[in-house]
Amino acid sequence: MSASKYTLQCNSHKCRAKLSGFAWVTACSHVFCDHHGSEAFSRAPSSCPVCSKMLSGKLDVLRTELTPSEQYKSMVLVGLQPETVLEISHNALVFWTYQVNQERLLMEYNLSRAGGQVLQMEKFMTQQNQSRELELNALRGEIASLKKVLEEYKLKYNEVLERLNERNRQYQKLQKLLDSLRMHTLGMEEKDPTPPTFPTGLVKQRSPHSSPSFLGPEVDRFFSLGPDNTKTFFQFSTPTRDRTHSFIKKN
């Protein structure tokens, strides 16, 4: 950093503002802005806020103008011996060099501190990346197992779907067969209006006195009467004829 481009900064760690206008300088080679210098050196005796050196002398603390006028610069050293001028210039240059050196040390300290923080952050990020990588591997394993389970469920689903399709095909065949039987039954009913007789599964035992099938049911009923039934049959009497009414109407 060249001296021509360097600007003094307030040595207060709370301020660190670039100085312009008026500033407070101390015999211990520290400089402060007008605001913090007025607060620190308003009471006597005072001490340096940076190094805590007691500043009890009359010229140990001085409020100076950083950009003096041309008239001030032309008259401030007038009449002094060259040795005095050189000594004053030497002291001013030593103060300036000290400020630049302190600023460089502060920048190096901040840089080393930032480097340490960067190393800590890199270490922390490495640990975080490792933990995230472990979690990612675990999640990948879970995803692989879930994929296997999903494939098994897909196979089961396809099997069940195939069975369902087969049952649907069988149901459709049975439905078509049922419809054809219904249509056939309806066609038979239209041709033969008499209600169909359904066998009950009971076989009627033919009596030895029953008549042949060609004689009809009445004859069969007559011949199927046993001895006791015959007596009962012939004991039937004709109904009493009402004498007041005749079955044949006389003309």
Image: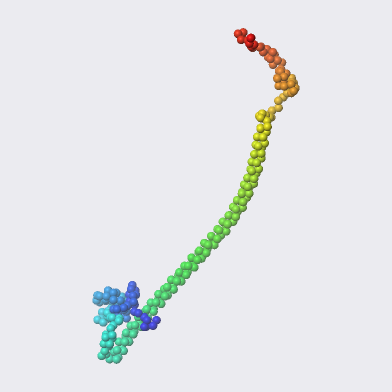
Q: Residue furthest front?
A: 251
* Relative image position of residue 247 (x, y in whole percent): 64, 11
Across the whole image, how many numbered discs are drawn on residues? 0
Frontmost residue, 209 versus 24: 209
Q: Residue at x 26, y 86 (%)?
A: 71
* Relative image position of residue 74 (x, y in whole percent): 27, 87
Q: Does residue 26 show up?
A: no
Q: Residue at x 47, y 70 (%)?
A: 122
**Colouring method of the image:** rainbow
Relative vertical location of residue 192 with respect to residue 215 in this rendering, above or below: below
Q: Residue at x 67, y 13 (%)?
A: 236
Frontmost residue, 49 versus 32: 32
- The image quadrant of residue 2 is bottom left
Q: Does residue 4 show up?
A: yes
Relative vertical location of residue 143 with respect to residue 190 in this rendering, above or below: below
- The image quadrant of residue 226 is top right
Q: Residue at x 55, y 60 (%)?
A: 140
Q: Residue furthest bottom?
A: 82
Q: Quadrant of the C terminus?
A: top right
* Relative image position of residue 225 (x, y in whole percent): 71, 18
Instruction: State left or right for residue 199 relative to residue 119.
Output: right
Instruction: State left or right for residue 76 relative to residue 156.
Output: left
* Relative image position of residue 186 (x, y in whole percent): 65, 34
- The image quadrant of residue 53 is bottom left
Relative vertical location of residue 200 with respect to residue 150 in this rendering, above or below: above
Q: Quadrant of the N terminus?
A: bottom left
